[in-house]
């Protein structure tokens, strides 16, 4: 897969252009599936109004409301209770997965439980994450971001990219550069700190920062 890992969605021209380039065709010709699952694990954003805003494209962070040819919903918590024939072909045919923010460990748990994780490496779709939807691709998220506790504890996530992410730099009271530096010091590998005008593009393991804002890379 191709990954476009954002802090706050596709909210500037540079990130938008990167997405179109990764799709290889216009957004208006591309079919999308949105995944709101991470929102249910975070007390600030779900369930309720904000989840509906994400799915319906009514929220400020641009992902679902970019002008896709079609948008469907893929709710990971439902997948274990239905046959794979009901959803696997749908995922294989889609052009882009739009994965909301929320709680990264909750999303990680349901990526595994649903079977989507096993499917991801074989997909040709673009994976667009926002906040926790991006962080879940890292090897781990750090204790700072542990909210929902997985059955086995810990802060490990999917490890489909080899770096960790600290989103929303300067946008929340505790997302300061000082906090980010302390967080990065406790991480084992490379760690990117990104603001809401920044995304990280990953294709075949090649990493490129796409930004109209501020970011910093910490290396061990």
Image (spheres, helix red, strand yellow):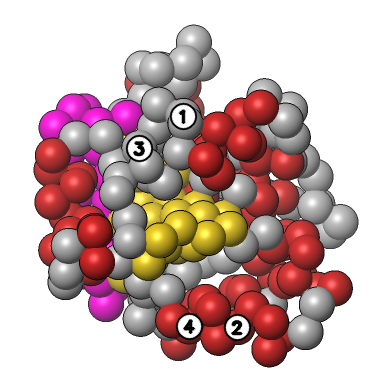
- Mark 2: give few (<14), some (14-19) or many (20+) Cα within 10 Å: some
* Nearer to the camera, 103 or 194: 103
Query: Horizontal placement of 171 versus 79: left or right?
Result: left
The secondary structure type at the circle numbered 2 is: helix
In this rendering, the answer to whether 198 lies above or below 120 is above
Q: How packed is label 3: few (under 14 Cα within 10 Å), some, or many (20 or more)?
A: some
Q: Earlier in the sequence, mark 4 or mark 1?
A: 1
Q: CA distance from mark 1 to mark 2?
A: 28 Å
Using the image, tell me which numbered label, if any, was put on residue 88: 2
Q: CA distance from mark 1 to mark 3?
A: 7 Å
Residue 26: give x, y in percent of width and height.
Answer: 17, 62
Residue highlighted by disc 4 = 92
Mark 1 lies on a secondary structure that is loop
Sequence order check, earlier mark of 4 and 3:
3
- Which numbered disc covers residue 62? 3
Disc 2/disc 4 C-alpha distance (Å): 6 Å
Q: Which residue is mark 1?
A: 59
Q: Is residue 119 above or below residue 219?
A: below
* Residues marked 3 and 2 touching at CB (< 8 Å): no
Name the main secondary structure of what is drawn in magenta. strand
Q: Residues within 10 Å of mark 4 (few under 14, many from 20)?
A: some
Q: Position of residue 103 (x, y in %)?
A: 65, 41
Q: Are marks 2 and 4 in contact (CB under 8 Å)?
A: yes
Residue 11 x/y as whole percent: 26, 34
Compared across the picture, whether 150 is left or right of 74 comes to right
């Amino acid at each position: 897969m191709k990954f476009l890992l954002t802090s706050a969605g596709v909210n500037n021209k540079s990130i938008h252009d990167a997405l179109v380039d990764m799709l290889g065709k216009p957004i208006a010709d591309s079919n999308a599936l949105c995944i709101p699952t991470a929102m249910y694990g975070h007390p600030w954003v779900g369930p309720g109004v904000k989840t509906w805003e994400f799915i319906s494209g009514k929220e400020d962070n641009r992902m679902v409301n970019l002008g896709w040819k079609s948008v469907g919903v893929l709710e990971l918590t439902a997948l274990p209770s239905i046959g794979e024939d009901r959803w696997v072909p749908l995922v294989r045919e889609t052009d882009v997965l739009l994965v909301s923010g929320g709680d990264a460990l909750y999303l990680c748990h349901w990526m595994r439980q649903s079977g989507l994780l096993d499917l991801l490496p074989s997909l040709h779709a673009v994976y667009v994450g926002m906040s926790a939807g991006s962080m879940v691709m890292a090897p781990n998220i750090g204790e700072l971001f542990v909210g929902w506790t997985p059955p086995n504890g810990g802060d490990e996530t999917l490890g489909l990219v080899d770096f960790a992410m600290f989103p929303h730099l300067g946008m929340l009271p505790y997302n300061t550069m000082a906090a980010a530096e302390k967080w990065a010091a406790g991480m084992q590998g490379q760690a990117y700190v990104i603001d809401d005008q920044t995304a990280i593009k990953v294709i075949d393991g090649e990493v490129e920062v796409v930004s109209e804002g501020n970011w910093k890379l910490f290396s061990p």
